């Protein structure tokens, strides 16, 4: 039967040497090896390298990349219909201003108040925005700063005491622009003395105890305080020593 098959193969298909034909077991082994290879054609590594290069040189892709622009770190894109800080010409905000309460809260003099923001990409920060809902009495040593996730002070305003009387939006500039890598930061507000003004906060106000930081560790608190008797922004803070706060301060970076 084998001899007859070889003859038929030669006659019908013109294959003189049937030993060149693949056997069932040989074909199965090759398919298994190909399926198990991490990148059998080399195109996966090529695609990843191409995407990473484009992400790191300013090209836009449907996803969020880590600071190095690595395609492997991409995650699902955010809702393209959502209004974001960039639509207002801002770098980041602690919460959407349309969610603010009609009443503010009064921070404690000498205590540093922190509110966390996220930067999705590298941006140069030149200043901040706050909203004063009720005037204080002769506030002193008033500053806004930016701390990175390690607790290091990266940007700060000059003393705003003279500008923080009355009510309304305040937009102090930083003493020097800060080129901020993508990541998490705290916007810090300090009113060192006098009677502090009331600042805009989220609609939840001080209610729903614990909800402003639900799920967060102390060191990753979204809203927190630290220190006492301060009259200037400290050069660094210890995230693990924060006291979670229940007031959702509104602040923005520009």
Image (cartoon, grey):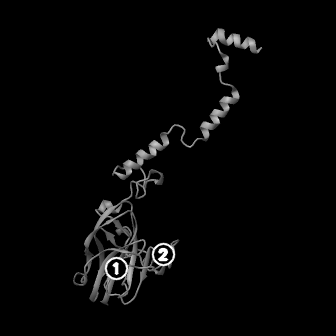
**Residue at the outermost top position:** 11
Q: Nearer the viewer, residue 63 or 122?
A: 122
Among the 4 quarters of the image, the one containing residue 237: bottom left
Name the side, left or right, on which 18 lies relative to 110: right
Residue behind mark 1: 189
Residue 96: percent from the left, percent from the top?
37, 67
Mark 1–mark 2 distance (CA, rounded to whole Å): 18 Å
Q: Nearer the viewer, residue 17 or 56?
A: 17
Local secondary structure at mark 2: helix
**Residue at the outermost right position:** 1
Local secondary structure at mark 1: strand
Residue behind mark 2: 219
> Is residue 24 in view from this perspective?
yes
Say which quadrant the N terminus sits in.
top right
Please tell me whether residue 78 is drawn above or below residue 176 in the rendered image: above
Residue 13: percent from the left, percent from the top?
62, 12
Say few, some or many: other residues with alpha carbon within 10 Å of mark 1 (under 14 / 14 to 19 / 20 or more): many
Q: Residue at 45% across / 43% down in the picture?
A: 47
Residue 246: percent from the left, percent from the top?
45, 79
Please tell me whether residue 106 is drawn above or below residue 2 in the rendered image: below
Q: Residue at 25% across / 79% down in the picture?
A: 158
Q: Residue at 63% across / 34% down in the picture?
A: 31
């Amino acid at each position: 039967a084998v001899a007859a098959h070889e003859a038929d193969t030669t006659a019908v298909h013109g294959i003189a040497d049937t030993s060149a034909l693949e056997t069932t077991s040989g074909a199965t082994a090759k398919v298994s090896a190909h399926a198990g290879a991490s990148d059998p054609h080399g195109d996966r590594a090529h695609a990843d390298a191409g995407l990473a290069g484009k992400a790191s040189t300013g090209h836009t892709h449907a996803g969020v990349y880590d600071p190095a622009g690595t395609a492997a770190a991409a995650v699902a894109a955010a809702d393209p219909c959502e209004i974001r800080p960039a639509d207002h010409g801002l770098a980041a905000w602690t919460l959407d201003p349309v969610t603010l309460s009609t009443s503010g809260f009064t921070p404690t003099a000498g205590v540093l108040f922190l509110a966390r923001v996220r930067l999705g990409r590298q941006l140069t920060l030149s200043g901040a925005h706050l909203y004063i809902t009720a005037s204080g009495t002769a506030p002193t040593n008033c500053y806004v700063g930016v701390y990175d996730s390690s607790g290091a002070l990266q940007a700060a305003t000059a003393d705003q005491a003279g500008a923080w009387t009355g009510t309304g939006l305040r937009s102090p500039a930083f003493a020097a622009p800060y080129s901020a890598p993508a990541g998490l930061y705290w916007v810090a507000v300090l009113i060192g003395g006098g009677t502090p003004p009331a600042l805009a906060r989220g609609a939840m106000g001080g209610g729903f105890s614990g909800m402003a930081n639900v799920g967060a560790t102390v060191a990753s608190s979204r809203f927190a305080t630290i220190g006492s008797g301060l009259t200037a922004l400290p050069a660094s803070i210890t995230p693990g020593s924060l006291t979670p706060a229940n007031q959702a301060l509104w602040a923005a970076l520009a």
